[in-house]
């Protein structure tokens, strides 16, 4: 069945059920993301944000529904076809840090070499992308010598080195202080301005309010709101009121 | 392509440097198994060669009665030559037999003054060694024949030794090889776990399954190949000792054709080790390197 809308991402009635879960990770989710959009996926822990991102890059298969990304039917792809989908996107995962025994430069080069870039092309791309994320001067440093924000910049550099049309970032500001978090979001917004579609999952209220982009809210596997421009959704505030410290 | 190969080789080298002790265990077990298989292979080759030369070595010796005149001996030779199972017949006249016996025993006994007690002898070779007992049976009934020797027991002994070596060697070598393959499988599995981050990054950036798995398969091939190389050295070094031992046990083996050429062992064992190691590693990589599921 063709992807009728021609959108960057099109989810049709998608459900995901894990064998261990009592409630589905995602339940009959419908979502369309057009080319060039910047979208925040928000929700509490366990809302289904990471599952939704994993669906997009083929790490999780839907138990029902269809997942179309860049015109490709991800729900129907075979395992050996997944790499060719992933080459069209950059992924900043939540729990895969940089390779500790490699320098910043080597970390970014590693991904390009793994997908067959020549040494010459790797040298050019790594230099460009490190400059783009503001990490040129730290190219020879190892991950343990970097701050959290710098490490995240390198992870973003690695994800966009292949110049993908789509960038997925899973909780890129987790464990970062507010200023550094905003720097990372500014970097992602800048990447978005250059034409890349960006999807960011987060539960960081401040950056969502400040960025004023499209916000899709998830709760227990369902989309409960989808606002084209705005801050942290009031629906989530009603369900989970912010804790005020006296 | 050159850059791609360089990347795969650098990843393989990185894999090999992890879990050094496990790598050593895998290589040495592969080596022991291949030593056993190599030695058995060489022994079987030699025994096979023996089996092929047996038809010329094992002949029926027919001793005629002393009273049988030469004309009768020649007539019997013609009769034997007419039999379809018989390849050739040689008549050893009693005079020639006596001269040969005196020559063979000259250091032990002085036979010069004794009268010749030997009869004429016919040596019969068959087309197939299995036909020897049949020929012997037919000839035994002839009234001119005194005694028939067909060396059946010696033939049986060599063939039973060959069977024993084959089954013991294949059984023990097979068991050890299985252990080696399990160890290589485990070594690769642990390497995959220890390189989970690299595997994860490669999977996320869109490296193909072949690219991600190839370094692990190469690792298994190198483990098996190294084991095979060391095994080839040990087998060739031990071949002389083994050959001497066999000749001491069965002296008639000394005139047999040479054993397996060394180049076969030097190339064959590393190749076999490398092939089996690669297959094992491919199996482990196929099972443990996935790009969907929880990346």
Image (tube, coloured by chain):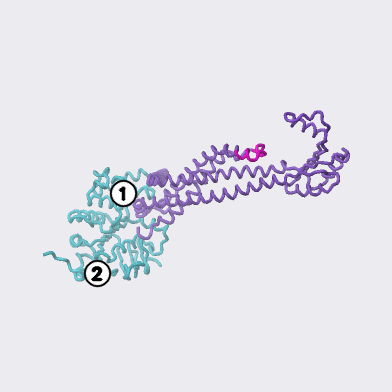
Chain colours: A cyan, B purple
**In the image, B89: left or right of B214?**
right
Q: Badge 2: how crowded within 10 Å, few (<14), some, or many (20+)?
A: some
Label 1: which secondary element: loop
**In the image, A50: left or right of A116?**
left
Q: Nearer the viewer, residue B126 or B100?
A: B100
Question: Which chain letter goes with mark 2?
Answer: A
Q: Is residue A182 above or below residue B29?
A: below
**In the image, B234: left or right of B1?**
right
Q: Is residue A225 magenta?
A: no
Q: Which one is closest to the eye, mark 1 or mark 2?
A: 1
Q: Which residue is mark 2?
A: A225
**How many numbered circles does the render carry?**
2
Quadrant including the N terminus of chain B? top left
Q: Is residue B3 visible?
A: no
Residue at figure coordinates x 26%, y 69% from the top left: A219
Q: Nearer the viewer, residue A202 or B168?
A: B168
Q: Nearer the viewer, residue B141 or A167?
A: B141
The magenta segment is B245-257
How far separated are the C-alphas under marks 1 and 2? 37 Å
Q: Which residue is mark 1?
A: A99
């Amino acid at each position: 069945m063709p992807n009728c809308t021609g959108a960057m991402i099109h989810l049709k009635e998608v459900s995901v059920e894990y064998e261990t879960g009592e409630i589905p990770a995602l339940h009959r989710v419908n979502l369309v993301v057009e080319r060039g959009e910047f979208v925040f996926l928000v929700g509490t822990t366990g809302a289904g944000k990471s599952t939704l991102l994993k669906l997009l890059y083929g790490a999780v298969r839907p138990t029902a529904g269809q997942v179309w990304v860049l015109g490709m039917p991800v729900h129907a792809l075979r395992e050996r076809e997944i790499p060719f989908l992933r080459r069209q996107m950059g992924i900043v995962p939540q729990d895969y840090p940089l390779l500790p025994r490699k320098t910043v430069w080597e970390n970014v080069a590693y991904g390009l070499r793994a997908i067959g870039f020549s040494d010459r092309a790797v040298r050019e791309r790594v230099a460009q992308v490190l400059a783009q994320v503001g990490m040129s001067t730290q190219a020879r440093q190892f991950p343990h010598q970097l701050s959290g924000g710098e490490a995240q910049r390198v992870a973003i550099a690695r994800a966009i080195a292949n110049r993908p049309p789509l960038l997925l970032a899973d909780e890129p500001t987790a464990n970062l202080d507010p200023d550094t978090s905003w720097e990372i979001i500014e970097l992602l917004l800048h990447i978005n301005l250059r034409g890349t579609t960006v999807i960011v999952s987060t539960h960081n209220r401040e950056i969502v309010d400040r960025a004023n982009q499209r916000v899709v809210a998830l709760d227990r596997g369902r989309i409960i709101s989808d606002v084209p421009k705005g801050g942290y959704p009031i629906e989530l505030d009603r369900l989970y009121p912010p804790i005020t410290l006296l | 392509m050159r850059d791609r190969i360089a990347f795969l080789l650098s990843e393989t080298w990185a894999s090999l440097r992890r879990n050094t002790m496990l790598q050593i265990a895998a290589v040495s077990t592969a080596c022991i198994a291949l030593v056993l298989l190599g030695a058995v292979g060489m022994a079987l080759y030699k025994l096979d060669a023996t089996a092929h030369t047996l038809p010329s070595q094992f002949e029926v010796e027919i001793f005629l009665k002393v009273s049988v005149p030469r004309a009768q001996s020649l007539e019997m030779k013609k009769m034997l030559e007419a039999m379809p199972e018989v390849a050739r017949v040689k008549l050893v006249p009693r005079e020639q037999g006596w001269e040969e016996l005196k020559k063979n025993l000259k250091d032990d006994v002085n036979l010069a003054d004794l009268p010749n007690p030997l009869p004429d002898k016919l040596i019969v070779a068959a087309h197939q060694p299995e036909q020897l007992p049949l020929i012997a049976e037919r000839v035994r009934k002839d009234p001119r024949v005194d005694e028939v020797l067909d060396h059946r027991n010696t033939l049986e002994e060599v063939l039973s030794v060959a069977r024993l070596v084959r089954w013991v060697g294949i059984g023990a070598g097979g068991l050890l090889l299985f252990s080696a393959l399990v160890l290589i499988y485990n070594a690769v599995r642990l390497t995959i776990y220890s390189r989970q981050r690299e595997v994860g990054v490669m999977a996320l950036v869109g490296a193909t399954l072949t690219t991600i798995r190839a370094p692990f398969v190469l690792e298994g091939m190198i483990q098996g190949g190294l084991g095979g190389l060391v095994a080839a050295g040990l087998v060739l070094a031990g071949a002389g000792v083994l050959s001497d031992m066999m000749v001491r046990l069965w002296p008639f083996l000394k005139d047999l054709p040479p054993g397996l050429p060394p180049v076969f062992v030097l190339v064959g064992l590393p190749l076999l080790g490398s092939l089996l190691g690669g297959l094992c590693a491919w199996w482990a990589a196929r099972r443990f390197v996935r790009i969907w599921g929880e990346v």
